[in-house]
Image (cartoon, helix red, strand yellow):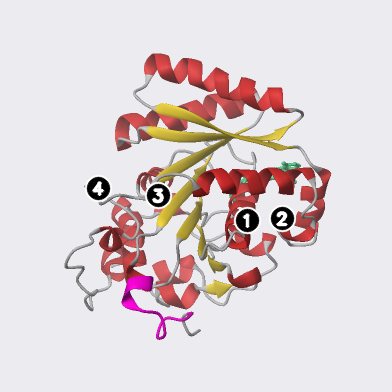
Amino acid sequence: MPLPADSNASSHTTRAPVRVIAVASGKGGVGKTSVSVNLAMSLVHAGQRTLLLDTDLGLANVDVMLGLSPQFTLADVFAGRCELRDTLLEGPRGLWVVPAASGKRHMTELLPQQHIGLVHAFCELDLPIDVMVVDNAAGIADSVLTFCQAAQDVIVVVCDEPASVTDAYALIKVLSRERGVNRVQVLANQVANANEGRQLFEKLERVSSRFLDVTLHYLGAIPRDEWLRRAIQRQEAVVEAFPGSPSALAFREIARRARQWQSPQGPRGHVEFFMERLITQSANEPGHHDPLRSAVA
Ligand SMILES: Nc1ncnc2c1ncn2[C@@H]1O[C@H](COP(=O)(O)OP(=O)(O)OP(=O)(O)O)[C@@H](O)[C@H]1O
Ligand SMILES: [Mg+2]
């Protein structure tokens, strides 16, 4: 598949810093993929050139939620059957998607070096995008930790279940202690009312401020919404299918807040998506080596 505007875009456009937002949760099934898909689509609506990366090799479903049929997925990249750029799919309204594959070898079975190799491979995509949203697998595996560490912002999705709160705390703890993540955005999902979201945040914030060196920000709440379930049935983002629904309005507000986050200022000295674009002066053109392939080998 030809890359979008690659040949036409100026080097300034394609090499500008990319804001990377990772979505994670600890516990499974709380709404990471729904949040990733709808946040990415809302950013597209707001005029941001957006790439949505699905890193859940075990139970990938970004492509299913958007009704896309990938020819190649990340699983093919790790198997050496294609390059990362071959997996790029164009979704609704020009949203770019890198799909994973369901039921294939799980990311946790890959080596940490391979996760890092994937992060570095994005530097070579040369895609004209402003923002990348990374949907993660559930749990606190090395892959999740690396992709969160390599993003500038991490959204931890939590819902009103004891296991969701304790697993979110466990994730925040390892991100902070082992990966130096010192800022986390908390998003409450499937809430019955605004108070519920705020209370969930306060629960997490109380224990985190006591035991961890990390600042939690309350990003907001997405209501439990039947329209979102219907949109999933239709394989569309709810912000596309039912833009006036309560969850769609909430996603738009979350995207508005996310756009106000400070842009990356420069490399932070550890594994990072699109690191080359953060090094402003004398940005070398990418060489011919393929870090993903070499990490996979
Ligand atoms: N705000 C919401 N309102 C109603 N239902 C929701 C909402 N968010 C998520 N759901 C329901 O929860 C299900 C799981 O959501 P989703 O697949 O986004 O979770 P996940 O955290 O990505 O799961 P996994 O850990 O398996 O990757 C959805 O199929 C949907 O039915
Ligand atoms: Mg998911």
| Residue 243 visible in this rendered orientation of the protein | yes
Q: Which residue is mark 1?
A: 42
What residue lies at 47% left-to-right and 48% top-to-bottom? 22
- CA separation in Å, label 4 and label 2: 35 Å
Label 3 Cα crowd, 10 Å radius (few <14 / some 14-19 / many 20+)? many
Q: Earlier in the sequence, mark 2 or mark 3?
A: 3
Mark 4 and mark 1 in contact? Answer it, CB < 8 Å.
no
- CA separation in Å, label 2 and label 3: 26 Å
Q: Tell whether circle 1 marks a residue whose Cβ is less than 8 angstroms from ligand 1.
A: no
Q: Which residue is mark 2?
A: 239
Residue type beneath disc 2: Val
Q: Is residue 29 above or below residue 274?
A: above
Which picture quadrant has residue 42? bottom right
Main SS, magenta residues: loop
Residue type beneath disc 4: His
Q: Earlier in the sequence, mark 1 or mark 3?
A: 1
Q: Is residue 145 above or below residue 124?
A: above
Figure quadrant of the C terminus: bottom left
Q: Secondary structure at mark 3?
A: helix
Q: Is residue 256 above or below residue 200?
A: below
Q: Which residue is mark 3?
A: 147
